Image (cartoon, rainbow, N blue to C red):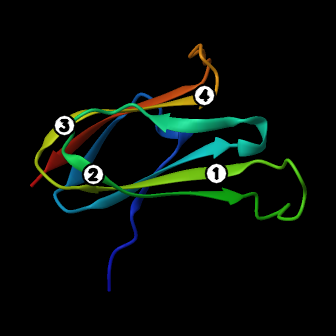
Amino acid sequence: MQNKPRVITEADQGKEIKLRLGETFTIQLAANPTTGYSWYLLTGPAPWTPVSRKYVTDPHKPNLTGVGGKETFTFKAESVGGGFLRLLYLRGFEEKINTDKAFQVRIVVQK
């Protein structure tokens, strides 16, 4: 049986997250793609690799148009090391990249 991935949320903003080599982790952030905004990953070379990305609407309001939900990014710690994992909440179709909403954590992968 595989362990559940560690979940990192907005409450972890700015923190250092320590992981074990081979561990899977997810980042869950509030989002509402009906506004044109989405989370964009800005991380360069890192000791983790992306596994998946999905969006889930609010389970308490599943059939309402325009209701927000959570965007979830899943990663796997592939090698020992560290770095910053950064995401910006942007409208990808806009020429100017302006956002008041950003998320960053420092990830440290250990043996």
Q: Quadrant for residue 84, please give it.
A: top left
Q: Which residue is mark 1?
A: 70
Task: Give the label, 3 or 4, closer to the camera.
Answer: 4
Amino acid type indicated by mark 1: Lys
Q: Secondary structure at mark 4?
A: strand
Task: Give the label, 2 or 1, closer to the camera.
Answer: 2
Q: Do the residues bearing badges 1 and 3 touch, measured as CB atoms within 8 Å?
A: no
Q: Do the residues bearing badges 4 and 1 touch, measured as CB atoms within 8 Å?
A: no
Report the side of 13 relative to 96 (left or right): left
Q: Position of residue 35 (x, y in %)?
A: 77, 36
Q: CA distance from mark 2 to mark 3?
A: 12 Å
Amino acid type indicated by mark 2: Thr
Q: CA distance from mark 1 to mark 3?
A: 26 Å
**Which numbered tag is attached to residue 49?**
2
Residue extending farthest to the bottom is 1
Q: Which residue is mark 4?
A: 90
Q: Secondary structure at mark 3?
A: strand
- Quadrant containing the C terminus is bottom left
Earlier sequence position, callout 2 versus callout 1? 2
Q: CA distance from mark 3 to mark 4?
A: 25 Å
Q: CA distance from mark 2 to mark 1?
A: 20 Å
Residue shown at 65%/43% (left/top)?
A: 30
Q: CA distance from mark 4 to mark 1?
A: 15 Å
Q: Secondary structure at mark 2?
A: strand
Residue shown at 59%/30% (left/top)?
A: 92
Q: Which residue is mark 3?
A: 82
Q: Nearer the viewer, residue 91 or 69?
A: 91
Q: Nearer the viewer, residue 5 or 87?
A: 87
Earlier sequence position, callout 4 versus callout 1? 1
Residue shown at 38%/33% (left/top)?
A: 105
Q: Do the residues bearing badges 2 and 1 touch, measured as CB atoms within 8 Å?
A: no
